[in-house]
Image (cartoon, rainbow, N blue to C red):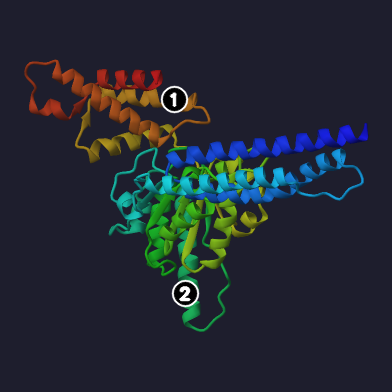
Amino acid sequence: MKREVGAGCGIMLLAFCLLFIAGGVAVVIEMCGEGDGADGALSLLVFVLLLAPFIYWGYAMIYKSMHPGKPVKITKNVARYGGAALLVLILFSIWAALKGNQVEKVVKPITEIAQQPKEPKDSVVITPVMEEDPYQELDELIGLDSVKEEVHTIANFARIQQQRKAQGLKVPKMSFHLVFTGSPGTGKTTVARIVARIYKDLGILKSGHTVETDRSGLVADYVGQTATKTNAVIDSALNGVLFIDEAYALVPEHEGYDYGREAISTLLKRMEDDRDKLVVIIAGYPDEMKRFIDANPGLQSRFTRYINFPDYTEQELFDIFHLYLRKNQYTITQEADQLLKDKLNYVVAHKTKNFGNARYVRNIFERAVEQQANRLTAKRNIRDDELSVLTKEDIEKAFKIKNRN
């Protein structure tokens, strides 16, 4: 009975090992189609080497059950078939590596991405330094009074510490990494770009550009690739600001291993190694960001300054809409203006957690302009002044379309 149990256990162990190897082969074939065959083949060989002791263990259990009292020996048939299987596996790995290298991979360099307009699905976007006065741009932002005060406080502190250093006085260490908390559309990305330019003006950073990314820009799909991907993004942010939106997505709420943790470990190491030329700003919802920071002691020690971005009031949203009007050379009728105010009052009173704030207003403006185009196109004769006027009808239809979506 004991011999049968040993043989059964050995067969099961070998079966599991073969199942894992078969799964690895399937993954490598899939990776070949994406141009990553070389990495997949190397990973498979390492995986098989790790399984080798278990394969031998399974064989030994079967051998012992069939030859009790004898030392385990590798029979000729096992050596022949095992060697053949290993040779096939090596040849397959070579084929996968060559196949992966033949696949044409279209990878846009960071400099090319920087020249493209930002789209919602971009995973990495570089914003070059603009020539405008960052302090004036900060002060001219609608609302965000508490945010402006915090940023000015940081700038004033850094400026005074530089003067103390010039006089030979002791300068306390300060972390310039920041945590931005708030709902979508409250200006976090805009302020991050301004902060980068302020840091350049103060001599904290040499370049002052901003690299904007999220989980998709840092985390890869396969083992061993996340660190490389994260390091590449960090390299592009050196001497500037790395802005990670929805950073809490790097640590999912569910338990278990996730590649996002590898990205965090890589980020923390680089923040230490490049502390004189890298500033990181992470952003997201308040509760989610607290969970994210609390999940790692390294994050707690490096991110100690929080800036909360409050939701815009109905009047501030109204002013933002009028800002879009002025920038794009539009006007609005009195009736349309009143309807806009009433609609925004209602939206703010009934908003949800995912309310888009300024982003919502921008979408309303874009829909209103589209509706104006539809209305004017239906007319036979269009006066020049009508090209710049939004009416009550345009605003009403814009809100209906937005709410329907």
Residue 273: tell me if it is visible. yes
Mark 2 secondary-structure assignment: helix
* Residue 211 against residue 1 in the figure, above or below: below
Q: Earlier in the sequence, mark 2 or mark 1?
A: 2
Indicate the position of residue 102 as horizontal and vertical percent values: 37, 46
Query: How far across and down, in percent of the image, does residue 348 sit?
Result: 46, 28
Task: Identify the image quadrant of the C terminus.
Answer: top left
Q: Position of residue 4 (x, y in %)?
A: 87, 32
Does 338 sit left or right of 25 as displayed?
left
Marker disc for residue 307 = none
Number of numbered labels in the structure image: 2
Q: Residue at x 29, y 26 (%)?
A: 367
Write down the residue under mark 1: 347
Residue, far bottom: 168
Q: What kind of residue is marked 1?
A: Val
| Rendered residue at 61%/55% (across/down) | 299
Give the residue pinned by disc 2: 162
Q: Is residue 229 left or right of residue 264?
A: left
User: Where residue 296 appears, x then y in whole percent?
Assistant: 66, 52
User: Which quadrant holds residue 290?
Assistant: top right
Specify the quadrant that holds the N terminus: top right
- Residue at the limit of the structure toward the left, as seen here: 381
Q: Residue at 32% x, 58% y: name it.
A: 129
